[in-house]
Image (cartoon, helix red, strand yellow):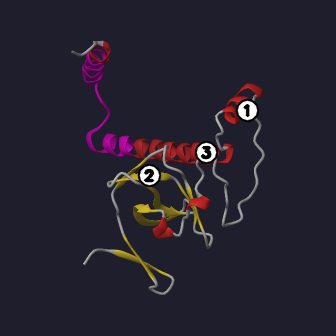
Amino acid sequence: MKDTLHVASDRLCIELHQPGALDPTCPTGCVAGGFGTFPGCRRTDGSCGVLAEKVGGLFAIGLGCVGRLDLGITDASQSGAGRRRVYTMRMPRVQVYLPEALAREVKRRKLSPSTLLQNAVRNEIERRELVVRHEKYLRDLRREVGEPTRADREYAEAIARRLRRRSVKKTG
């Protein structure tokens, strides 16, 4: 039997760890009942879903890339261009200032500033978490094997130089 998450007294069962990948071309989804906003993802069948890994960005639920209808997200709550945006939960308002040229470009392209900011904030939080994990990994590695010697550093720099040169060569 597959792992499932039971919601609302077993009226809704959703399989955990559904495959898919974060996809900025898929709209984010707001879920009724205050469960939060989830970024869009591409499911293995090619359809758009939402990446429901954490509720409110804090509590891990591990659903993966679930179908929009599985979480009660209908077309009315999708945030694609030209669609009316409907939020099914109250969100705090934040005032953001953009340079005039950037604001005009956002408007010209019919982008949602709210969605853009949410995605940018999520990405920055994730980036900072990765930096912290990377620093912890390096501390643990140094504790386990010690500081690299000068010869180790020179060897690593030589490999990095070769890789940089290789990346600018044209293939084919």
Q: Which mark is residue 81?
A: 3
Q: Earlier in the sequence, mark 3 or mark 1?
A: 3
Which residue of the protein is positioned furthest toward the bottom in this rendering? 9
Point out the stretch of residues depicted in magenta.
Answer: 137-163
Mark 1, residue position: 103
146 is within the stretch colored magenta: yes
Please tell me how crowded label 1 is: few (under 14), some (14-19), or many (20+) other residues with Cα within 10 Å: few
Q: CA distance from mark 3 to mark 1?
A: 16 Å
Instruction: Quadrant for residue 139, please give it.
Output: top left
What amino acid is labelled 1 in the image? Ala
Label 2 neighbour load within 10 Å: few <14, some 14-19, many 20+: many
Mark 3, other Cα within 10 Å: few <14 / some 14–19 / many ≥20? few
Residue 171 appears left or right of 38? left
Secondary structure at badge 1 equals: helix
In primary-sequence order, the first of circles 2 and 3 is 2
Contact? badges 2 and 3 (CB < 8 Å): no
Q: Position of residue 51 (x, y in %)?
A: 45, 57
Q: Earlier in the sequence, mark 2 or mark 1?
A: 2
Q: Residue at x 34, y 46 (%)?
A: 140
Q: Amino acid at mark 3?
A: Ala
